[in-house]
Image: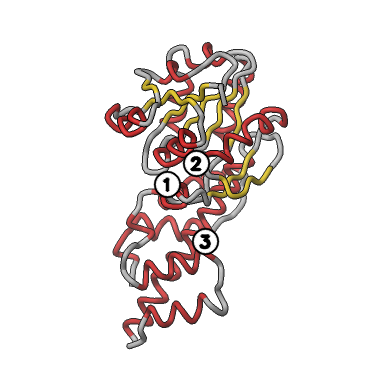
């Protein structure tokens, strides 16, 4: 663990993931567009960079966990980033972006002698803190082997290999998020009908998620929705990711009517709710 790791993006998910690395004994240099967000990690021993390139060690590993395609491209194309990463360097992208962006950035890295590895995360911030993350991964074999211990230290409970082709792991992430959002939106509608009909939504979801729908997503989101502690469409993530999935489907000329309907419902907000 003597190798210094660069870490860019300290949002709700990036912060606990980076903290896991520090707790596992890794040396970190961190960067965030809002510098103040790095203070808790600096207090734990991380170094703070003033620009993305300053997190990079030539031939080393840098991790990004940023909001969207534009933010990721801004990092990769920022001054000295690729030049510093250099021959043998690995960029682990944990952001949920479009497959086209993944393929484009993989080609850009290859032209500079570095390697791009996709490793988007399934898991909420509390799952990251509990080291209960699921991570699909794609990229060159040797690079994946090198970063696997790092992903495990970040909190990966399981790592699933989807080959060497860039775009593959983010497709899995996008379809996974599509299924999660679909399930959560269905639960909102179903439990709303139950409550309107005089049925205790908590009792209904307890019965259904212990019998017919025992998947963790139904159980966790069902409980939150029944207790009115969360609604998936209150976040900006579902709209962004369903939009990315729909764009990916359209680029492959594959019909995706459910994704189109779901995106329309998310964009219309409360007007599409019962």
The earlier-in-sequence mark between 2 and 1 is 2
Q: Quadrant of the N terminus?
A: top right
Residue 257 sits above or below residue 27 on the image: below
Residue at the spot of label 3: 258
- Identify the colour scheme used: secondary structure
Between 64 and 49, the one nearer to me in the picture: 49
Helix, strand or loop for disc 1: helix
- Mark 3 → mark 2, Cα distance in angstroms: 20 Å
Between 139 and 36, the one nearer to me in the picture: 36
What residue sits 38% from the left and 18% below the top? Answer: 51
The earlier-in-sequence mark between 3 and 1 is 1
- Mark 2 → mark 1, Cα distance in angstroms: 9 Å
Alpha-carbon neighbours of circle 2 within 10 Å: few (<14), some, or many (≥20)?
many
Residue at the spot of label 2: 96
Between 106 and 230, the one nearer to me in the picture: 230
3 vs 1, front mark? 1
Residue that lies at the very extreme toward the left in this rendered image: 36
Helix, strand or loop for disc 3: helix
Q: State the image coordinates of residue 267 (x, y, percent, origin top left).
A: 36, 54
3 vs 2, front mark? 2
What residue sits 45% from the left and 65% below the top? Answer: 220
Q: How many marks?
A: 3
Q: State the image coordinates of residue 162 (x, y, percent, origin top left).
A: 68, 43
Residue 176 sits above or below residue 150 on the image: below
Mark 2 near mark 1, Cβ–Cβ under 8 Å?
Answer: yes
Q: Which mark is residue 240?
A: 1
């Amino acid at each position: 663990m003597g190798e210094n790791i660069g870490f860019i993006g300290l949002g709700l998910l990036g912060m606990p993931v980076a903290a896991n690395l520090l707790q596992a004994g890794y040396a970190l240099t961190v960067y965030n567009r809002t510098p103040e967000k790095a203070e808790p990690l600096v207090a734990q021993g991380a170094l703070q960079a003033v620009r993305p390139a300053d997190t990079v060690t030539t031939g080393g590993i840098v991790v990004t966990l940023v909001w969207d395609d534009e933010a990721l491209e801004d990092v990769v194309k920022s001054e000295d980033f690729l030049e510093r990463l250099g021959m043998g360097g690995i960029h682990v992208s944990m952001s949920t972006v479009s497959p086209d962006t993944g393929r484009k950035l993989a080609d850009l890295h290859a032209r500079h002698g570095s390697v791009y590895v996709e490793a988007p995360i399934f898991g909420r911030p509390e799952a990251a803190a509990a080291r209960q993350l699921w991570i699909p991964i794609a990229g060159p074999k040797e690079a994946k082997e090198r970063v696997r211990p790092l992903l495990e230290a970040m909190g990966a409970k399981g790592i699933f290999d989807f080959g060497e082709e860039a775009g593959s792991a983010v497709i899995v992430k996008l379809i996974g998020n599509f299924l999660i959002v679909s399930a959560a939106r269905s639960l909102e509608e179903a439990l709303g009908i139950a409550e309107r009909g005089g049925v205790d939504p908590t009792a209904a979801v307890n019965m259904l998620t212990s019998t017919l729908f025992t998947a963790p997503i139904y159980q966790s989101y069902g409980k939150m929705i029944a207790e009115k502690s969360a609604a998936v469409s209150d976040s900006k993530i579902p709209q962004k990711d369903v939009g990315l999935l729909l764009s990916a489907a359209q680029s492959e000329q594959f019909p995706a009517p459910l994704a189109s309907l779901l995106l329309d419902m998310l964009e219309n907000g409360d007007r599409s709710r019962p």
